[in-house]
Image (spheres, rainbow, N blue to C red):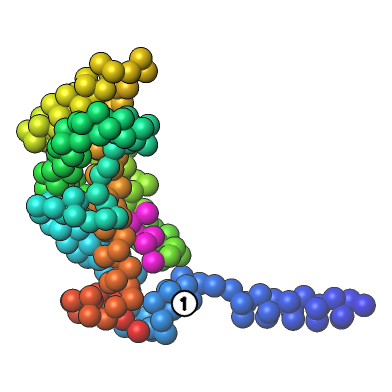
């Protein structure tokens, strides 16, 4: 019986050892059958940072251009859900142009604010650690973007909202919003006064992260998007 127990223990140890996942095993599973000689942990961390840098730069450049938000069906900022009934009522009373002006100005504010987003994101990317990189590698195609949002969303909102406030004033969104809802409030007993600045801030940040995730996924999957030797080394098959 004692010999059987020793044999069983020895066999179990072999099985557990054979199935153990080391960091190198995980790295091979995520990035392909690359050897430790060809791909180091530093390569992985640097590659992820470069991918995010590229995604953030391209995304903010696209969204900060004229019509970057306004003519993108997936990102265009419309009236908040709680204000859509108000929008319908305003249009029925002949205030359609005022509503259109308010919507255009919200999108112009987002486009203007996106210009200042890149430095904030890039600063956060620099803080990514080796341990963060391993966590990201265990995730999906947009895991790096998820990490960035999880780590920085609260602080970015605080830093970004004043830019939105300024942009809304600059583009006249606040004026159009106040005019539109002042007109509505004159003909309705149910007054509406949602937080325009907070709403546009949230939609702007969501739009930027949406674009960054698209860029990250493309870099991971499309060899044509792997525009540097490091990206090819980390993400290429």
Residue at left 25%, top 44%?
77
Q: From what the image shows, is residue 31 above or below residue 152?
A: below
Q: Which residues are magenta?
A: 141-146
Q: Residue furthest front?
A: 93
Q: Position of residue 47 (x, y in %)?
A: 26, 69
Instruction: Answer with the quarter of the image where residue 31 lies.
Output: bottom left
Q: Which residue is mark 1?
A: 29
Residue at left 39%, top 60%?
143
Q: Position of residue 34 (x, y in %)?
A: 38, 83
Q: Is residue 63 visible?
A: no
Looking at the image, residue 227 sits to the left or right of residue 170; the answer is right
Depth order, front residue of 189/218: 189
Q: From what the image shows, is residue 204 above or below residue 170?
A: below
Depth order, front residue of 163/152: 163
Q: Position of residue 196 (x, y in %)?
A: 25, 30
Image quadrant occupied by the C terminus:
bottom left
Residue 128 belongs to magenta span? no
Q: Position of residue 119 (x, y in %)?
A: 14, 48
Looking at the image, residue 27 sits to the left or right of residue 126; the answer is right
- Element class at badge 1: helix
Q: Is residue 101 visible?
A: yes
Residue at left 77%, top 75%?
9
Depth order, front residue of 226/66: 66
The residue carrying pointer 1 sits among few (fewer than 14), some (14 to 19) or many (20 or more) residues within 10 Å by Cα, namely some
Residue 145 belongs to magenta span? yes
Instruction: Answer with the quarter of the image where residue 132 lies.
Output: bottom left
Q: From what the image shows, is residue 10 above or below residue 46?
A: below
Residue at left 68%, top 79%?
15
Instruction: Answer with the quarter of the image where residue 227 lies.
Output: bottom left
Image quadrant occupied by the N terminus:
bottom right
């Amino acid at each position: 019986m004692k010999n059987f127990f020793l044999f069983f223990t020895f066999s179990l140890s072999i099985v557990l050892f054979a199935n153990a996942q080391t960091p190198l095993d995980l790295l091979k599973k995520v990035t392909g059958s690359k050897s430790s000689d060809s791909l180091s942990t530093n390569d992985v961390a640097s590659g992820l940072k470069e991918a995010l840098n590229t995604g953030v730069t391209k995304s903010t450049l696209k969204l900060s251009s004229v019509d970057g938000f306004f003519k993108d069906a997936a990102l265009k900022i419309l009236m908040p859900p709680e204000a859509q009934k108000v929008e319908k009522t305003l249009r029925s009373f002949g205030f359609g142009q005022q509503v259109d002006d308010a919507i255009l100005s919200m999108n112009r504010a987002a486009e203007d604010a996106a210009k200042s987003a890149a430095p904030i994101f890039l600063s956060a990317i620099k803080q990514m650690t080796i341990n963060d990189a391993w966590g990201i590698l265990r995730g999906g195609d947009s895991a790096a973007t998820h990490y960035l949002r999880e780590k920085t969303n609260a602080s970015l909102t605080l830093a970004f909202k004043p830019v939105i406030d300024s942009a809304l004033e600059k583009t006249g969104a606040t004026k159009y919003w106040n005019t539109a809802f002042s007109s509505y409030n004159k003909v309705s007993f149910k007054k509406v006064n949602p937080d325009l600045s907070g709403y546009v801030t949230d939609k702007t940040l969501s739009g930027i992260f949406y674009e960054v995730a698209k860029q990250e996924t493309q870099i991971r999957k499309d060899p044509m998007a792997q525009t540097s030797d490091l990206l090819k080394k980390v993400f290429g098959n």
